[in-house]
Image (tube, rainbow, N blue to C red):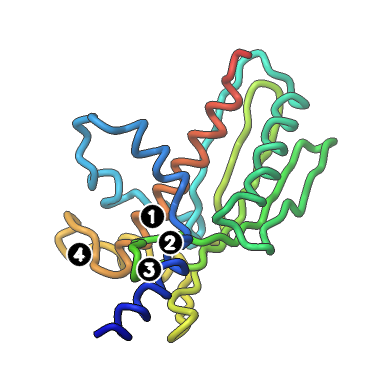
Amino acid sequence: MKKLMIAILCLLPLWANAQDNTWERIEQEETEGTNVNPDQKYLEGAVPLVDGRVEFSTVIEAPGKSKDDIYNIVLKYLTKMTTEANQTEFSRVVIADTVKGEICGNFQEWLVFKSTSLSLDRTRFFYSLVAECEDGKASVRMIHIHYLYEEERDPQQYKAEEWITDEYALRKNKQKLARISGKFRRKTIDRKDFIFNKLNSLLNDKK
């Protein structure tokens, strides 16, 4: 019994530093107390397809800001994202065209489903963010989404088109998420929403 307790105590420091979705904690604090159905936004139609590929997009209006202002704000944020705690060393900005106002960042990060002192359920999450900046607005897309799951035990690769769409991530009645693929869909949408909302906040900051 004594040996078992020692073994458990030795494991605790490893999991104490297990990554979690720090961005998600901020999101939860901001929405706490609302009456919105927490599952509604993940159901039918929440994952759009463009020419057969999963693509999330938004147009962020930024009245009064020039193309260069918007470009610099977006570039600064995407660059900062590459060094955040959930990112791997492979995350980087790969296109920064000041003339065209185009920015592209390729991200490889940890997306955590569940983290406790003794277990960690997460996936490696790959995606690209593309921003096209012009006077008064920015068009932002999240594309090339895929995942590497259970890489430490039994690596499984999933493309978004074959994993988080309505066909694969919703149950037949379309009112509930599928047990496994549904958690990928939920966290992907949460992450997309956080990034798009953050960019909107930055571009509309009056300071």
Q: Residue at x 43, y 61 (%)?
A: 16
Dot 1: what SS?
Answer: helix
Precedes in sequence: disc 4 or disc 2: 2
Precedes in sequence: disc 1 or disc 2: 2
In percent of width and height, residue 61 lies at 56, 24
Could you give the CA–CA distance between mark 3 and mark 1, rounded to whole angstroms? 12 Å
Between disc 3 and disc 1, the foreground one is 3
Could you give the CA–CA distance between mark 3 and mark 2, rounded to whole angstroms? 14 Å
Amino acid at pointer 1: Lys
Precedes in sequence: disc 3 or disc 2: 2
Q: Nearer the viewer, residue 18 or 77?
A: 18
Q: Residue at x 22, y 34 (%)?
A: 36
Q: What residue does disc 1 label?
A: 187
In percent of width and height, residue 21 lies at 44, 52
Amino acid at pointer 3: Asp
Horizontal side of 30 relative to 35 (left or right) equals right
Amino acid at pointer 4: Arg
Q: What residue does disc 4 label?
A: 171
Could you give the CA–CA distance between mark 4 and mark 3, rounded to whole angstroms? 22 Å
Q: Residue at x 79, y 44 (%)?
A: 96
Residue 69: which quarter of the image?
A: top right
Dot 4: what SS?
Answer: loop
Could you give the CA–CA distance between mark 1 and mark 2, rounded to whole angstroms? 22 Å
Question: In this rendering, is residue 64 above or below 180?
Answer: above
Horizontal side of 53 relative to 76 (left or right) equals left
Q: What residue does disc 2 label?
A: 16
Tell me the number on the disc at residue 121. 3
| Neighbour tally class for label 2: few under 14, some 14-19, many 20 plus, Cα within 10 Å | few
In percent of width and height, residue 190 lies at 40, 47
